Amino acid sequence: MSQDRVLSKAVLGRQTLLNTVGLILGGSLFVALAAQVSVPMYPVPMTLQTLAILIVGLTYGARLGALTLLAYLAEGAMGLPVFAGGGNGASLVGPTAGFLFGFVPMAYLAGLAAEKGLARGLVGTTVVGAVVTLLVFVPGVAWLSTFIGFETAVQAGMLPFLLGMVVKSAIAAMVVRGGWKAVEAYRAKG
């Protein structure tokens, strides 16, 4: 096994400006598409964004994962319909803004865990995914509580999402582990 700890580096090797920009744009598009897979709930919709963000962070690493989510937020701020339900920049000041801004450290921390070797096995990656996703509720619930109060924000903006958080973390772990298995199989042939 190579010393690579981040899947994108294992696949691409040396990072160039072109592949870095491609990864950022591709990753932000992936998150934007995942945001459109939505179960309408009020005030926070249930989407596949956190699954996509975990995959981006775990496969890109801390710096590139965070840059990808910053690009995603910038795309929304420019008016592109990248947020849940086709939302754009207005979402950055609405009830879900805390979650949106919390996505940047979520991707960073998932990537950092991958870089440190904490997110390699299926169980370890699932635990890392659940913990970093759980942390997104801090800014999310804090901001949402300014609109609907703290207790209601916890009940509406966190509790309904906890089971999904674990399931999405396990799915992300399987995707990333599958990616590593494919890399290992390719290297074994070579």
Image (tube, rainbow, N blue to C red):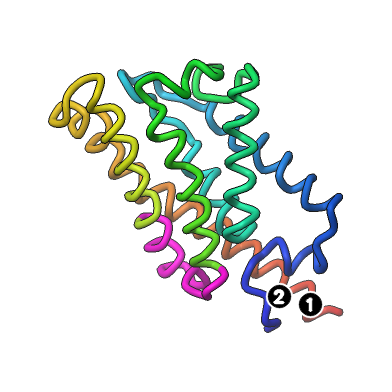
The three-letter code of the residue at mark 2 reads Glu
Question: Mark 1 = which residue?
Answer: 187
Q: Position of residue 177 (x, y in %)?
A: 57, 65
Magenta segment: does it hold 118? yes
Return the mark for residue 57. Answer: none
Provide the major secondary structure of the magenta segment: helix
Asked whether disc 1 touches disc 2, contact meaning CB atoms under 8 Å apart, the reply is yes
Q: Nearer the viewer, residue 131 or 142?
A: 142
Give the side of residue 118 with respect to residue 77, left or right: left
Q: What segment is highlighted magenta in the picture?
A: 115-130
The three-letter code of the residue at mark 1 reads Arg
* Depicted 160 relative to depicted 112: above or below: above
Q: Position of residue 170 (x, y in %)?
A: 43, 55
The answer to which quarter of the image holds residue 10 is: bottom right
Question: Mark 2 = which residue?
Answer: 184
* Depicted 90 relative to depicted 136: above or below: above
Disc 1 crowd rating (10 Å Cα; few below 14, some 14-19, many 20+) is: few
Element type where label 2 sits in the image: helix
Magenta segment: does it hold 27? no
Q: Nearer the viewer, residue 89 or 14?
A: 89
Disc 2 crowd rating (10 Å Cα; few below 14, some 14-19, many 20+) is: some
Q: Position of residue 94 (x, y in %)?
A: 39, 19
Q: Residue at x 47, y 20 (%)?
A: 91
